[in-house]
């Protein structure tokens, strides 16, 4: 499920993705195996969306304790495998051009980050990370997002990172998430986020408002002072221990002139 292109351009990735979907769509039965590697998970999501497959088998394997994982240094998402057998529903590629384009752009962002040794700054000054790419203290990942559930996880710091270095200036942090909790009885939300510079300096924080299972975003402004610029910056999310919280992605971008503030308390 890993897609590579002969050039680092959206059009090249779109051609490869379209060919993949077309090939899979022609088959009567398909079996795929992939790991919790975000590019692979994104391609599976595209296939799933475009071809509406009838799932015949969905098997998950955790090979982190396999001795071979030690030998090949893969005690991470690559050691957690997923095998899916399905019957695809044929579809016209043209009907899904917009989805293919979005997937290509997502893969391109990840590839650029890998090619620049961890600097996720692209030509637009945007740092975007899927939650599965970030360090986490608990929760389950599907290779793209990460979910904490009160039945299995205690409250506490959920995801953190990505430890990027930002030039001095004003920025906006965006957290895409889904909360199972509704806005009951006017209670303050228990899930939250903050922005840290260096080891302990918190410079902004805000709530992850209950979203009753619907996709939501929290945004907030923060500033990097000249003296803080060499320090790594991270966005942390916190699970309050009730219901469930899925963090889909976090992003940081330079503040545009006249851009409004989000739901953050700047410290």
Image (spheres, rainbow, N blue to C red):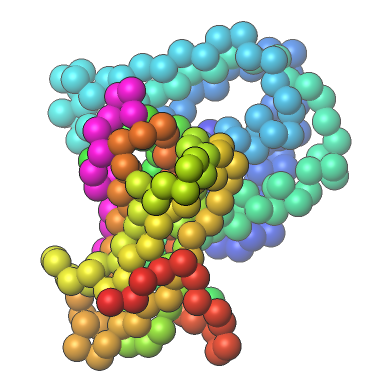
In this view, 52 is above or below 18: above
Q: Residue at x 15, y 28 (%)?
A: 70
In the rendered image, residue 201 lying in the magenta stretch gets the answer no
Q: Is residue 135 left or right of residue 59?
A: left
Position of residue 236 in the picture relative to residue 212 (left or right) = left
Q: Please give the name of the residue rendered at 41% of the width and 32% of the height, measured from the top-left corner.
A: 243
Q: Quadrant of the C terminus?
A: bottom left
Of residues 214 and 24, the one drawn nearer to the viewer in this rendering:
214
**Against 105, is 41 above or below?**
above
Q: Magenta segment range? A: 150-165
**Looking at the rendering, which quadrant does residue 21 occupy?**
top right
Residue lying at the far front of the rendered structure: 185
Q: Position of residue 78 (x, y in %)?
A: 34, 32
Is 237 situated left or right of 84 in this image? left
Q: How far across and down, in percent of the image, does residue 82 sit? A: 45, 22
> Which residue: 31% across, 42% down?
240
The answer to whether residue 217 shows anywhere in this view is yes
**Residue at x 56% of width, y 51% of height:** 216
Rendered position, 116 above or below 225: above
Instruction: Please provide percent x and percent y for residue 58.
Output: 52, 14
Magenta span: chief secondary structure: loop
Magenta stretch: residue 152 in it?
yes
Q: Is residue 77 left or right of residue 221?
A: left
Camera sees residue 167:
no
Classify 216 as above or below 147: below
């Amino acid at each position: 499920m890993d897609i590579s292109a002969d050039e680092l351009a959206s059009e090249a990735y779109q051609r490869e993705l379209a060919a993949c979907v077309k090939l899979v769509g022609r088959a009567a039965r398909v079996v795929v195996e992939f790991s919790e590697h975000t590019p692979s998970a994104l391609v599976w999501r595209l296939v799933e969306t475009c071809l509406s497959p009838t799932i015949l088998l969905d098997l998950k394997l955790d090979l982190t304790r396999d001795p071979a994982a030690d030998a090949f240094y893969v005690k991470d998402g690559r050691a957690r495998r997923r095998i899916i057998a399905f019957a695809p529903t044929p579809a016209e590629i043209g009907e899904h051009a917009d989805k293919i384009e979005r997937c290509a752009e997502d893969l391109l962002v990840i590839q650029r980050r890998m090619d620049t040794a961890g600097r996720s700054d692209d030509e637009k000054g945007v740092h975007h990370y899927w939650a599965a790419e970030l360090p986490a203290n608990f929760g389950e990942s599907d290779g793209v997002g990460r979910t904490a559930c009160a039945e299995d996880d205690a409250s506490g710091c959920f995801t953190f990172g990505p430890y990027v270095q930002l030039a001095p200036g004003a920025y906006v942090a965006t957290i895409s998430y889904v909360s199972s909790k509704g806005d009951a009885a006017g209670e303050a939300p228990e899930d939250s986020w903050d922005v840290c510079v260096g080891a302990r300096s918190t410079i902004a924080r805000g709530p992850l408002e209950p979203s009753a299972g619907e996709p939501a975003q929290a945004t907030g402004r923060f500033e990097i002072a000249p003296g803080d610029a060499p320090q790594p910056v991270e966005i942390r999310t916190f699970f309050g221990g009730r219901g469930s919280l899925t963090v889909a992605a976090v992003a940081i971008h330079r503040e545009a002139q006249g851009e409004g503030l989000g739901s953050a308390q700047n410290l």
